[in-house]
Amino acid sequence: MNPFHWKVAQSASEAAALKQQSGSQILAGGTTQLDLMKCGVFNPPQLIGINGLSELRSLSFDNDKISAGALITMSQLADHPDCQQHAPAIYGSLWQAASPQIRNMATLGGNLRQRTRCAYYRDPATFSACNKRNPGSGCAARQGVNSNHAILGASDSCIAVYPGDLAVALVAFDAVVIVQNPQGETRRIAIDDFSLLPGETPDQEHDLRDDEIIVAIEVPQTASLQRSHYLKVRDRSSNEFAAASAAAGFTLENGVMRQVHVALGGVATEPWRATRVEQALEGQPFNEETVFRPAELINQETQALEHNAYKVKLAPRVIARALMAAGEIA
């Protein structure tokens, strides 16, 4: 790991100002960032510590929204007495992610910006070609072993899958990311717009300017969120990234599905909102047949690679199973 300068920010505004300095990076929990520094993916000349900023540690469940500061840890949100009852999909996405030790350290702001687990991205010593790490160098994964890579949102430049869980639930239920600049001005970004598709610029992953840091996340408190579920399918039962996952919720009116929310993880280059599936399910009676058939619509958007065609079969099944589980609550 390369030598670096260490600075401790005294406020969110100061952190945003320091972040503008060339090569500087924010450090909170560090559960992913320090690993990537050790791998040689990152070599920042300066790290900015923000763990002491109490202004980023608020957490509340109000009647209309959940508000969480960027430094709230995954464990703190999951352990809040209202999380499991009022936001079961968010709760499920938290407790199924990583290990307890990592959840105790990892912050919500950092979790939203976690980097891909693509082996080609994380091994610069072996694979020099990675457009996400080294723009213009190519994508080694396209001709390599790509069984864990994306079937949704990929481009010729990048097929790396987004590995997180929490952001999938946040995308499904219309969360907003709040960012702040050095002048204290805030900007609200719909989380579906916060993550960027790779296109020809896979190194640009988020709608976050050089002079902005994440300060909070808000999630609307809705009836669909209260009757929701997060399903994660993986190769082993714990401490594993998703082969495919789904966050789903809806309300029932006289047995008819309303306000349907669905997002996918583990199969796309970003947390993937399944809009076509949502639209097809709206107004349908809730039963196994009407759930499974619209879930197949996700495959109008998928594109398999040489080794990951199994995800094409898996994606609609996790959607349908998540919806069925949510329906047991509804």
Image: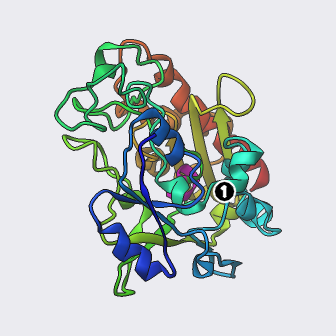
Q: Nearest the camera: 243 or 133?
A: 133
How has the structure been colored for display?
rainbow
- Give the magenta part as a residue range: 167-171
Q: Residue at image x 38%, y 74%?
A: 16
Residue 170 in magenta?
A: yes
Amino acid type of the residue tagged 1 in the rendering: Ile
Measured along the vertical axis of the image, is residue 189 above or below residue 238? below
Left or right of 242: which side holds 171? left
SS for callout 1:
helix
Q: Residue furthest right?
A: 81
Residue 105 in magenta?
A: no
Question: Which residue carries the number 1 mark?
Answer: 90
Instruction: Specify whether residue 171 is in view.
Output: yes
Mark 1 closeness class: few <14, some 14–19, many ≥20 residues within 10 Å: many
Left or right of 173: which side holds 308? left
How far from the left and from the top, in percent, is residue 174? 50, 64
How far from the left and from the top, in percent, is residue 272? 44, 45
How far from the left and from the top, in percent, is residue 13? 42, 82
Q: Residue at image x 71%, y 64%?
A: 77
Instruction: Specify whether residue 228 is in view.
Output: no
Predominant SS along the magenta part:
helix
Q: Residue at image x 42%, y 70%?
A: 213
Left or right of 121: which side holds 132? left
Q: How many marks?
A: 1
Measured along the vertical axis of the image, is residue 30 above or below residue 321? below
Measured along the vertical axis of the image, is residue 243 above or below residue 85? above
* Quadrant where the C terminus is found in the figure: bottom right
Q: Nearest the camera: 244 or 100?
A: 100
How far from the left and from the top, in percent, is residue 32? 54, 45
